[in-house]
Image (tube, helix red, strand yellow):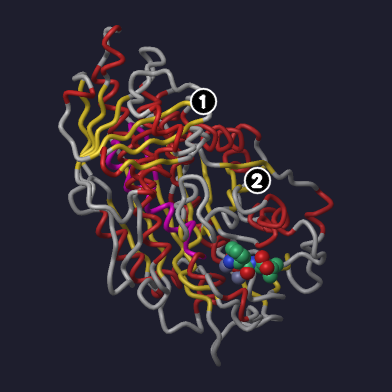
Amino acid sequence: MNFELTISPINEIDSDLELILVVKNNFKHDFIKDKKLLKKAGFKAGQDETCLFIERNRLYVGVESINDENLRVAFAKALQALSSTSYKTLKVATYMQNKESYHNIRAMVEGILLGSYTFNTYKSKSSTSKLQNIIISLEEYSAFELNMEEYADAIELGQITSDATNFTRDIVNTTPEDCYPKTLANIAKELTVDSELSCTILKVKELKEEKMETLLAVARASRHKPRVIHLTHKPKNAKIVVSLIGKGLTYDSGGLSLKPANSMVGMKLDKSGGAAVLGIMKAISEMNLPIEVHGFVGAVENMIGGDAYKPDDVLIAKNGKTIEVRNTDAEGRLVLADVLCYAQQEVKADYIFDFATLTGASVVAVGHYTSSVMGNSNKAKNLIIQGAKDSGELATKLDFNKHLKKLLKSSIADISNISSSPYGGAITAGLFLDEFIEKENKKRWAHIDIAGPAFIAHSWGENPQGGSGAGVRMMLRVLEKLANK
Ligand code: BES
Ligand code: ZN
Ligand code: ZN
């Protein structure tokens, strides 16, 4: 999709369709051309309400008030309403706020791109929107001396972050038959073509050399061999170093602690953390931020079979800690334990963030819309919370405590892979990961459980049904902030 920015008046722009934003209870604006018709149609301009006048080539969409969040979602809903139409060019005017309103434009671009996303790979007949050109008129801003470069940058940032989110959505939506560990590795390698990213892939031989035995145990019963991916963005004069680690379970059957039939449906989502890391790395290289970013993905399939790892096994993680397996469905933390150790060995980072669809308990605790953020440092956690706010994602902190930590005790090994209590499962999973964070890194790390928002059952906000790309936009805001400090 192409975006064009112009100060030409909206009425002088040629296009197939005009998208008109209406603020609730404010029908006075000149942009609103069909006031009587809108009244007849019962259009109140409530948030996300749409009204399409086909013969007039005008689509109206309502917002409660003008802010980034409302704009992003309203534009996404408007674009969703156009999903099966044949319009090719769309023009839209903007409401002037002040001359620093470029963040509003970024939100609009994000809404347009996130809202026009569809996943048709497995449909024999696909219905995608034909929209190619979006023309944004800054007519209203003509009273100000505009810094057009800032507006163009806002559009570009909106495009890069939304394209990356849609890229992650595609990976998450792809079936486990078509997306397995080697596929994720190939996608990572593909990202290095025409970019300055570099990529190292660890296969079984290297994983054994690196003593990543807990990851290998989880992977053992699958016909698909595991991979650990390491992507690097290393510009000259980098100000800060960040490591990102993603859970890339291309399928989670639960293993021998097999999931019940209904809970297994949808477990292609379990690669969402890894897919988010790939999306973030793609965007970071496109933005060319002056920070060093490393993306690690533990790509594994958790299956059953004669060779499967078992409840009662004791595994030795890369850092030498022994783990009693009491449930093979708590596999993500086993994979992450080794990848976290590997990431810390390879890179001395200022910040370490991991993304994982780690626990159903996170969904129980905070619901489907929100990610939970854990760790030992308020500074690291607050960065994520703010990044979520700035990007339109939802995230909230869940606090660690020493009582919950005790529930991970094992009588036979250093630690058990599940808690002895059915309660507080999101936090005990986070506390398990904490065992694999080195002392000097404790305050540099935050864990983000994206189990709630990673996969959307029924469309909400700017998200269609399916993979949401959770984590991508929030992390990009964090990295932008760290780069601009
Ligand atoms: N991948 C799941 C967590 C999950 C559940 C993500 C639902 C998204 C939606 C994870 O590997 C898992 O199975 N966790 C178990 C842990 C339990 C055995 C301690 C869970 O949450 O039930
Ligand atoms: Zn599991
Ligand atoms: Zn899992």
For numbered disc 2, what is the local secondary structure? strand
Quadrant occupied by the N terminus: top left
Mark 1 or 2: in front is 1
* Residue farthest to the bottom, as pictured: 306
Q: Which three-letter amino acid code belongs to the residue tagged 2? A: Met
Label 1 and label 2: CA atoms lie apart by: 33 Å
Pointer 1 or 2: first along the chain: 1
Residue 98 quadrant:
top left
Closest to the observer: 360 or 307? 360
Q: Position of residue 123 (x, y in %)?
A: 32, 71
**Could you tell whether 316 is left or right of 140 in the image?**
right
Residue 291 forms part of the magenta stretch: yes
Identify the residue at image location x=65%, y=41%.
396
Residue 298: where, in percent of width, then height?
46, 63
Please state, as top left, top right, bottom left or bottom right, where the C terminus lies in the image.
top left
Left or right of residue 192, residue 117 in this image: right
Q: Amino acid at mark 1?
A: Ser
Compared to residue 43, the image places residue 189 above or below, namely below
Residue highlighted by disc 1:
65
User: How many residues crowd mark 2 within 10 Å: few (<14), some (14–19), many (20+)?
Assistant: many
Which residue is drawn at the image coordinates 81% and 49% (left, top)?
402
Residue 255 horizontal/vertical position (percent) = 59, 80
Please identify the dominant SS of the magenta region: helix
Is residue 473 shown above or below 36? Answer: below
Is residue 322 visible in the rendered image? The answer is no
Q: Is residue 146 magenta?
A: no
Q: Closer to the camera, 137 or 278?
A: 137
Which residues make up the magenta segment? 270-293
Residue to which mark 2 is pinned: 374
Q: Quadrant of ligand 3?
A: bottom right
